[in-house]
Image (cartoon, rainbow, N blue to C red):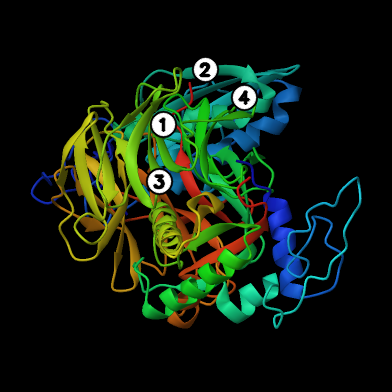
Amino acid sequence: MSYLPKAMWLIAMLGLAACNNPDRFGAGGAGGAGGAGGAGGIDSTGLGGADDPRSVAYFQQTLGDRVFFAVDQSTLSDEARATLTGQAQWLQTNSDYALIIEGHADEQGTRQYNLALGARRASAAQNFLISQGVAASRIRTVSYGKERPVEVCSTEDCYSRNRRAVTVLSLGAGS
Amino acid sequence: MTYQRPFGLLLALGLMFGGLVAAPVVAQNGPLRIEIVEGVIEPLPFAVPDFVAENGAAGEYAKNLARVIASDLSGTGLFREIPASAHVGRISSFDAPVAYGDWKAINAQALVTGAVSASGDRIVVKFRLFDIFSGQQMGEGLQFAGTTQSWRRMAHKVADAVYSRITGEGGYFDSRVVFVSETGPKNQRAKRLAVMDYDGANVQYLTDSRSIVLAPRFSPSGDRILYTSYQSGFPKIYLMDVASVQARALGDQPGTMTFAPRFAPDGRTVVFSLEQGGNSDLYTVDTNSGTLSRLTNAPSIETAPDYSPDGSRIVFESDRSGTQQIYVMSAGGGEPQRISNGPGRYSTPVWSPRGDLIAFTKQHQGRFHIGVMRVDGSEERLLTASFLDEGPTWSPNGRVIMFTRETAGAAGQSSLYSVDITGRNLRPVSSDGAASDPSWSPLLP
């Protein structure tokens, strides 16, 4: 197995920007399984916006690419299950994508424990996606512990958004 | 006014716990000794005049050596320097008899004199320690020779000898600290491995900031560093040779996360956490053969392991009871025994180099503390309190704990602090910018 984190990040950024840059890694959402063309050809495809159901932006923004957890917990809430069910359905349709689930913790814990806790959360999301029919071979997990908060304040309002598992898409399922 | 010698002059350490505080040994006519006991200590007044420069090239070191020695001793909180501006006596020759009256007049109890000579890239540093009120030299004079580059280390060695003679304890000044240097905003923190002298001098960066690095740990001889890096995209343990700055992955298993490594006292075995399928357990790996052994097998989080100084036991944290607590088990695994019993969550246990105490992080009612307890969990005491204190590391002599303190909010930053195991002398440690995850080396050879 080999994953390309840089390509993954680039796709994530392009998806967030919902722009129309040509995707040099092959098809984005709109073109389906375009891949890298035939004899040296380069396909140019729009990535689509959040209203295009096949786009990464749709996955991230409309379906929701993340689920949240209670303090020191890794069990999935009903809301988290609903989000992940939507992700699983999308992933079955868009089978070109592999995914990395990032587990995160808020800053209220020690570093090593938060790494372990982030791994538990990523694993909880992973297991749920597998139970919904997403092939285990498409999923990897990584824990960031408390190293990469999205919100920087030190109140529960921010903490609740930092205790998360984020599904990050990359092209190259089953590689 | 007559100066009252508080205890005579030997600081007697290790009597800090309840029930064990013996009456201080008052040795009015005995040797200089400070007793380090619980409660308020009047710092022992000392003087370190500029060293005598024995040749022209030594001039630049003569003052600097004295300054570093004074800073080491004052930094312990056990000594108070009498500044040069108050001195009556002058030391113009290293071998001339000491005029005790001159130093008694300013109430100095201890006097450190020294001399330095330099030639090419070599310097020779000599010192003597005097007990002013008993009017005699304490121990033999000592001489250190080395390169001019290592002049600070020689100052630390002099201060270690002075500290050791007066307290009866080993020193800790000639030591280094490996840590994580931090830059950038909280949600995009860049982290680099760095190493420095214990007092923040000579900061040297060991990695660039392309990958997150966490929790470096020195080997028992200080020549290698274990740490966790995201350089592969996933957290994994690496082992770095300090001299060559070359690193290799250690204990890597596909599809797992490895973290929280710590050397056994043998310098060969490493205990660490391995996460698979969301569950973290403790393993060891032999750094030579790469052989893995599993120590725990539980659905809970087992992490932050550390060995007892004799290598026979491992202390670690686990949330098997529902919250993080501290456990001790045999180094080969087996049934662990819970030792933490108070309210709150206990984590990051580290065994004192003396073997008698466990330092830990405690989280309780929204605050973080660094604390110590006996190995059986008794006599817990909290030494600090703040928004976020974590990750204690012991000084080589087991008297001082260094840790990470992080401030709250969007502009929150990490920095290093140290505190005496009695809870006194809490102070920031200089580190050339924001810093976290310190690990203290043994005393350098």
Q: What residue type is labelled 3?
A: Glu
Q: Mark 3 lies on which chain?
A: B
**In this figure, which residue is indicated by the disc labeled 3?**
B275
Label 2 to label 1, Cα distance in Å? 13 Å
**In this figure, which residue is indicated by the disc labeled 1?**
B162
Q: Quadrant of residue B219?
A: top left
Closer mark to the observer between disc 1 and disc 4: 4
**From the viewer's perspective, is residue B143 above or below residue B353?**
above
Instruction: Name the quarter where the N terminus of chain B is drawn.
Output: bottom left
Q: Is residue B163 left or right of residue B248?
A: left
Q: What residue type is labelled 2?
A: Gln
Residue found at x 29% / y 31%: B168
**In this figure, which residue is indicated by the disc labeled 4?**
B243
Do the residues at discs 4 and 3 belong to one chain?
A: yes
| Residue B143: mark in rendering | 2
Closer mark to the observer between disc 2 and disc 3: 3
Q: Is residue A137 left or right of residue A22?
A: left
**From the viewer's perspective, is residue B135 above or below residue B373?**
above
B7 or B87: nearer the viewer: B7
Q: Mark 2 lies on which chain?
A: B
Label 3 to label 1, Cα distance in Å? 47 Å
Q: At which x and y percent is residue B276? A: 40, 45
A65 or B293: nearer the viewer: A65
- As helix, strand or loop, the secondary structure at mark 2 comes to strand
- First-in-chain label (2 vs 1): 2
- As helix, strand or loop, the secondary structure at mark 1 comes to helix
